[in-house]
Amino acid sequence: MRIVLLGAPGSGKGTQSQLLVKSFGIPQISTGDLLREAVAKGTELGLRAKAAMDLGQLVDDATVLGMIRERIAKPDAVNGFILDGFPRNIVQAEALEKMLDSIGTPLDAVVLMNLDLGILFKRLSGRRICQDCGQVFNVYTAPPDGGAQSACGSTHRLIQRPDDREEVIGKRLEVFEAQTKPLIQYYQGAGLLRSVDADADVSTVFASIERALRGA
Ligand code: AP5
């Protein structure tokens, strides 16, 4: 199955992708994670991307499309994938369509995760990540179990993503409104869009996504 998770920053795409990986046995492809990996390694691509990411803007299309082309050609993606954070604008959506058409494997569904702006802001400003094991928490909705032994073998050492600072969150939400939201109509027109309410606990949202995909 080839799925796109479409939603604003903080709508839960990453959280739900992890559950879908287990349930469908296909990989999560997150352009945000791929870019952060490049930033951490200090590659030329990473250095270029960092400037845009720190400002809450989109990384240029050519860079992101090159990364995606390479990633979906890997053997683990042959039976499908979950695209998390891609496409992000019409140019990327059209390029993806061409890419998949050329290998005869079109998208099966695009799941739109709906959430109010106020909640998005809280989810992003409250997000913390363990710098050792990568587990994602939220100081408001999913705090770590105070001081307990963690999956990474010690107490989690939590950090905040640089773009989860309040002054950057506003810009990211603006970029979503201006550049990513038009994809809703784009995929509606293509008959691929399935809408879910993302304002519920993690397992309820997951059940809605599974239901939406079963009809795809
Ligand atoms: P990216 O990493 O893709 O970030 P994003 O789309 O802004 O999404 P997030 O990862 O912030 O949120 P999410 O929806 O995954 O939510 P999560 O599950 O973590 O992109 C980062 C940057 O990279 C971009 O700004 C851009 O610069 C660049 N970039 C990436 N892709 C690009 C592209 N295609 N083109 C150009 N540039 C690109 O959840 C958030 C928090 O909420 C967590 O704390 C979680 O615990 C909590 N939570 C989740 N679900 C629930 C729930 N149901 N109830 C309560 N709390 C919940």
Image (spheres, rainbow, N blue to C red):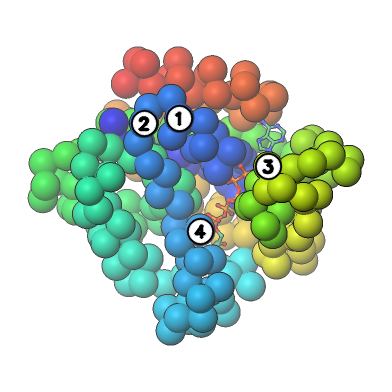
Residue designated by label 3: 151
Distance from disc 1 to disc 4, alpha carbons, whole Å, reads: 20 Å
What amino acid type should be assigned to the residue bearing mark 1? Lys
Q: Residue at x 42, y 44 (%)?
A: 28
Q: Residue at x 10, y 50 (%)?
A: 102
Q: Secondary structure at mark 3?
A: loop
Residues marked 1 and 3 touching at CB (< 8 Å):
no
- Structural crowding at the residue carrying mark 3, measured as other residues with C-alpha within 10 Å and reported as few (<14), some (14–19) or many (≥20): few
What amino acid type should be assigned to the residue bearing mark 2? Gly
Residue designated by label 1: 22
Quick check: 72 left or right of 179? Answer: left
Residues marked 2 and 1 touching at CB (< 8 Å):
yes
Residue 9 vs 190, above or below: the answer is below
Distance from disc 1 to disc 3, alpha carbons, whole Å, reads: 18 Å
Residues marked 1 and 4 touching at CB (< 8 Å):
no
Q: Is mark 4 within 8 Å of ligand 1?
A: yes
